[in-house]
Image (cartoon, rainbow, N blue to C red):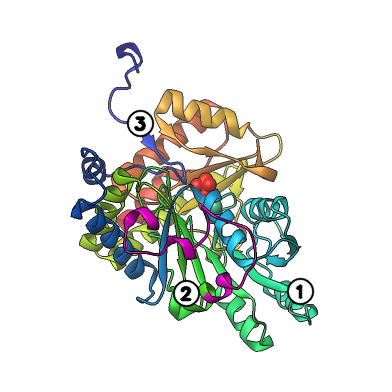
Amino acid sequence: MSDSTRIPGRRLLHAPGPSPIPDEVLHAMSVQNMDLADPRVDASIAAAEAGLRRLIGTGDSTRVLLFIANGHGVWESVVENLAAPGDAVLVPGTGHFSESWAVLTEALGRRVVRTPWREGHPIDVDAVAAALEADREHAIRAVFAVHTDTASGVTSDLVPLRRVLDTLGHPALLVADAVASMGCEPIDMDARGFDLVIGASQKGLMCPPGLGIVAVNERAMARAAATPAPRFYWDWARRDGAMNYQKFCGTAPLPLLHGLAAALALIEQEGVAVVYARHARLASAVHAAVEGWAEGGALGFVAHEPGTRSVSVTAIEARPGAFEADALRTLAREQFQVAIAGGLGPFRGRVFRIGHLGDHNEAGLLGALAGVECALRRMGVPLGDGIGRAVRRLAA
Ligand SMILES: *Cc1c(COP(=O)(O)O)cnc(C)c1O
């Protein structure tokens, strides 16, 4: 960036990923390349794997696999290892993210059974139960469940899905996409009975994009070994071995590994329960602001049920004809230095999203909410008192 475009102060990054990177993580990544036999390489991989196991609540028998990839890459790795071409998987509807995963799965030649999605609502557990019950031959190999749908800001409780599988005695594996929730709220992989959990570096884990995470329990590793799909780079069995060259199917992403190890250490220093409480508190302040703004009649939550509103991201819908969500986003970024996200898929043009996941605090969040409120007021959008409510919520 040239000096003439320098932004004084900081632009507040409130996208639901990529999220801001703590200075400690930036510094940890600023290291010279090392030869791959340098013990520091294996040490950072071991720290990342162990930290992730603790964070998502799983034990040593679960394999934690790291890929040079984004979330879409790990989606693909899950498909390639769990379903052979022609096999079926069940994708419970959560919105844009479940649909994107379903489309990717179909593009790879697998069949997808979908359950319907109702805008602003979590997974329809009854529809999932009906689809699994109808599958008497057990053709469905896995359930691909999105925990937090980042487009709608709705978090689905995935425990009922485990219960349905168990009640029916259905052998499908349960895969939890925790890309938007890992590091933001408890995942509890083993306690909740998830066979796989997937994540990515650039959201609650406060790192740059580029590292995809797949945690695979023993049952799922065995199922993958028996799945005859052609694969190489994504193959989980190949990612075994004493050498980090095997773990990464080639050269390890050194800076990202150092960064992830540092980010996980920050979470543990703060205390994981404290991190989750902070996310809940900041989300509640965003919700208070939206409740205040909504009194003007021009906007409202996408997530209908308050209990399903994500601790990571809040999606806000402009009432028809009230204002252009994308124009708001541009104004907020260019005039008020708050970067928020737009609407995805069916929400394009009518939704904006405020991310509050990862390295955020009260002051930064209030600044971001105030910047959004400034932009809304500049556009002439009728509003109740949002920022005042957020302040009172945090002061309470
Ligand atoms: C961001 C996201 C993805 C996709 O991750 P990319 O890194 O953008 O490919 C998948 N699932 C969820 C829930 C996400 O929030």
Between residues 194 and 87, which one lies in front from this camera angle?
87
- Residue, disc 1: 131
Label of residue 11 in the image: 3
Q: CA distance from mark 3 to mark 2?
A: 41 Å
Q: Earlier in the sequence, mark 3 or mark 2?
A: 3
Instruction: Locate residue 211, reporting x and y percent.
Output: 41, 49
Residue 129 in the image: above or below residue 262: below
Q: CA distance from mark 3 to mark 1?
A: 46 Å
Q: Secondary structure at mark 2?
A: loop
**Quarter placement of the N terminus:** top left
Binning the other alpha carbons within 10 Å of mark 1 as few (below 14), some (14 to 19) or many (20 upward) gives: some
| Mark 1 residue type | Ala
| Mark 2 residue type | Asn
Residue at 58% from the left image edge and 79% from the top image edge? 162
Q: Residue furthest top?
A: 4
Report if the beta carbon of the residue with label 3 is closer than 8 angstroms to ligand 1.
Answer: no
